[in-house]
Image: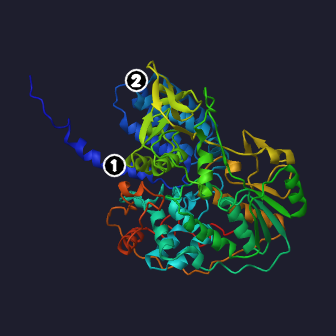
């Protein structure tokens, strides 16, 4: 018998490992705007290279399928080619011995269905669909299409006020997005090809930490148009629309149901993540434009909406999603069972809970659940548990939020589905009873939990916070004549409400609960389209000269992360948890930017993402 070796079968395996890491980074940084059929062809070529050669369908079929897909991607195929591809893919899927073959074939069939419009364009028009083409990743993936490379360059030169002006060109909430944005702009950053994506949110935070947003003058308002616009909802989407509409010269009135402006930024995000004084900096800057009247504590019903529609030239409805969803549990209405949204709503008006010595259970796995859990810690709870029916890796909350909650002492009870609420003799909740789960088959893109054959678990609770989602109060507006489906308003691609000319709708109430930056993007689009509806085509300028691009620094460097106050300190108060970058850190991080707006396939003339 020959001796065994602890080394890999081939010396190349270890070398391939490092190369595969580079392959992973290239996939992760795949630029937006790339032809999907080219992507599928590359995927198939990789699959063909992975075949072991044992079974004929995979060994001979994948290279042929890859060849046909490349013909389609190059606009050299016809309907007969497409038929051959489908038949071949089905044969490979059904006859291959292992996943190398059948998964690649199934993925091809799925792609031909998913990208059917692109397939048709390649077969008939012999070209990609209109608008296809690589673009600057960070700008494209930002819902507000902010000139990210531009303001990074400005921060790198210490021109913080100019950076705020440039951000404000497309997003009037530079401070909000510096503190709470989920930074989708970082997802495909080309710097991933070298080391790691830029900390774009951290760079923005550097700017607003050095110069307060309300100390930077907004652009001069254009001459009055004589038109009046009503904005229903004073959250990020509504205030964004109001800001740009006012800059265009229109008179704007904002109707807000709460005591103060800010929407879910004030009434849904705790102060330790977004200090209220920082939110007020953005709001003061927006209102400084002038021509914006604010009416708080004004709830709009069907009658009021009809009156507004008659009195104003256009209306933008951006009421957000400020109702908490409930669970149909036995004793679910017991004393001590509270909606997470209601809790955060009260905190937004300064009414903080006192959970001193109490055991708190939070039901849910999203950002709101983490906000409630971390808030409960700060409110003095003796124990805080998050009960979630899926795995921790399935939580929709940001990974960093989950990690921060754990560090602050929150227990994650995962794969535990709420079954009922146990109450004491006075009718107050005393425990949450959960049914253990096991993870099962993937449904709608996520592994679904199913009940496990395990005994129920009892989690003691003096307070149970339900954080399982948010609803939209559509009824008054439906009574007025707006359309809703599955609890959200319906609008066309221009955000106009069907059958109601001049009535627009956007943000969470139209898209469903999402993010601050998505709501801002909707408000910007609404302002632009309302301006066009009113017969104008205003353009605005921020008058900021961008620095000349420097030669790329291609030396791999570590990504600068934003540090937080120690958990043992921050969990005892509601002060902001994040520190900022130092000057040296900001200079290094800005220096890592590859200026894709000037170099590479994304290079186009300034203003490609047209200002509202």
| Between 536 and 404, the one nearer to me in the picture | 404
Mark yes or no: residue 137 visible.
no
- Tell me: 298 left or right of 148: right
Q: Label 1, label 2: how many angstroms apart (C-alpha)?
A: 27 Å
Element type where label 1 sits in the image: helix
Look at 38% across and 25% down and name the residue there: 55
**Nearer the N terminus, badge 1 or badge 2?**
1
Q: Residue at x 57, y 31 (%)?
A: 86
Which element is circle 2 on? Answer: loop
Q: How is the model colour-coded?
A: rainbow
Is residue 565 shown above or below 394?
Answer: below
**Relative image position of residue 404 (x, y in whole percent):** 41, 50
Q: Nearer the viewer, mark 1 or mark 2?
A: 1
The residue drawn where x is 47% and y is 35% is: 64
How many labels sit on residues?
2
Quarter of the image with the N terminus is top left
Instruction: Pick the quarter of the image with the C terminus.
Output: bottom right
Task: Determine if residue 216 is in view.
Answer: yes
The image shows residue 166 at horizontal and vertical percentages of: 58, 74
Q: Residue furthest front?
A: 426
Q: Residues within 10 Å of mark 1 (few under 14, many from 20)?
A: few
Please state if 336 lies on the left or on the right of 537 as rendered.
left
- Residue 97: numbered disc: 2
Q: Position of residue 610 (x, y in %)?
A: 66, 68
Which label was assigned to residue 535? none
What is the x, y in percent for residue 56?
Answer: 40, 25
Tags 1 and 2 touching, CB below 8 Å:
no
Label 2 CA crowd tier, 10 Å (few <14, some 14–19, many 20+): some
Nearer-the-camera pick, 82 or 109: 109
Nearer-the-camera pick, 201 or 341: 341
- The residue that disc 1 covers is 21
């Amino acid at each position: 018998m020959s001796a065994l070796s602890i080394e890999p079968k081939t010396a190349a395996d270890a070398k391939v490992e490092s190369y595969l890491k580079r392959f992973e980074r290239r996939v992760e940084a795949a630029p937006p705007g790339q032809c999907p059929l080219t992507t599928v062809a590359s995927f198939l070529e990789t699959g063909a290279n992975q075949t072991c050669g044992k079974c004929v369908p995979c060994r001979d079929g994948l290279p042929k399928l890859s060849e046909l897909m490349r013909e389609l991607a190059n606009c050299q195929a016809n309907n007969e080619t497409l038929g051959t591809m489908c038949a071949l893919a089905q044969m490979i899927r059904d006859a291959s011995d292992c996943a190398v073959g059948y998964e690649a074939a199934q993925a091809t069939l799925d792609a031909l269905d998913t990208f059917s419009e692109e397939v048709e364009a390649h077969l008939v028009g012999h070209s990609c669909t209109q608008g296809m083409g690589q673009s600057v990743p960070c700008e494209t993936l930002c819902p507000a299409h902010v000139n990210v490379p531009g303001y990074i360059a400005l921060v790198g030169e210490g021109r913080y006020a100019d950076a705020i002006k440039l951000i404000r060109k497309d997003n009037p909430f530079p401070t909000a997005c510096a503190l709470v944005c989920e930074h989708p702009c970082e997802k495909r950053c080309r710097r991933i090809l070298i080391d790691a994506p830029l900390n774009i949110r951290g760079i923005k935070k550097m700017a607003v930490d050095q110069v307060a947003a309300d100390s930077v003058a907004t652009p001069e308002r254009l001459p009055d148009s004589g038109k009046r616009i009503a904005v229903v909802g004073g959250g990020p989407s509504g205030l964004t629309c109001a800001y740009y509409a006012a800059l265009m010269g229109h008179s704007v009135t904002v109707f807000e149901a709460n005591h103060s402006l800010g929407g879910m930024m004030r009434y849904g995000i705790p102060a330790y993540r977004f200090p209220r004084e920082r939110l007020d900096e953005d709001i003061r800057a927006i209102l400084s434009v002038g021509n914006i009247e604010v009416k708080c504590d004004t709830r709009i019903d069907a009658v009021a909406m009809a009156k507004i529609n008659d009195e104003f030239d256009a209306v933008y409805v951006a009421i957000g999603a400020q109702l908490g969803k409930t669970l149909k549990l036995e004793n679910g209405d017991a004393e001590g069972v509270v909606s997470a949204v209601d809790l955060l709503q009260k905190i937004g008006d300064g009414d903080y809970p006192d959970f001193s010595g109490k055991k708190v259970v939070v039901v849910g796995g999203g950002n709101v659940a983490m906000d409630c859990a971390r808030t409960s810690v700060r409110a003095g709870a003796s124990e805080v548990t998050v009960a979630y029916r899926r795995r921790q890796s399935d939580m929709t909350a940001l990974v960093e939020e989950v990690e921060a909650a754990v560090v602050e002492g929150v227990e994650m009870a995962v794969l535990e589905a709420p079954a009922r609420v146990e109450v004491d003799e006075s009718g107050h909740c005393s425990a949450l009873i959960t049914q253990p789960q096991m993870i099962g088959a993937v449904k709608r893109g996520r592994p679904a939990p199913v009940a496990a054959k395990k005994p129920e678990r009892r989690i003691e609770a003096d307070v149970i916070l339900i954080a399982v989602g948010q609803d939209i109060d559509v009824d008054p507006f439906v009574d007025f004549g707006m359309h809703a489906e599955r609890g959200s308003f319906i609008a066309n691609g221009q955000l106009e409400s069907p059958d109601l000319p001049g009535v627009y709708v956007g943000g969470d109430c139209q898209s469903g609960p999402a993010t601050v930056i998505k709501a801002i993007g909707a408000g910007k689009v609404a302002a632009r389209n309302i301006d066009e509806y009113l017969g104008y085509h205003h353009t605005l300028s921020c008058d900021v000269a961008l620095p000349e691009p420097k030669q790329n620094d291609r030396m791999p460097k570590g990504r600068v992360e934003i540090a937080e106050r120690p958990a043992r300190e921050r969990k005892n108060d509601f002060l902001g948890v994040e520190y900022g970058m130092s000057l040296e850190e900001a200079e290094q991080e800005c220096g890592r930017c590859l200026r894709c707006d000037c170099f590479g396939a994304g290079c186009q003339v300034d203003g490609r993402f047209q200002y509202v």
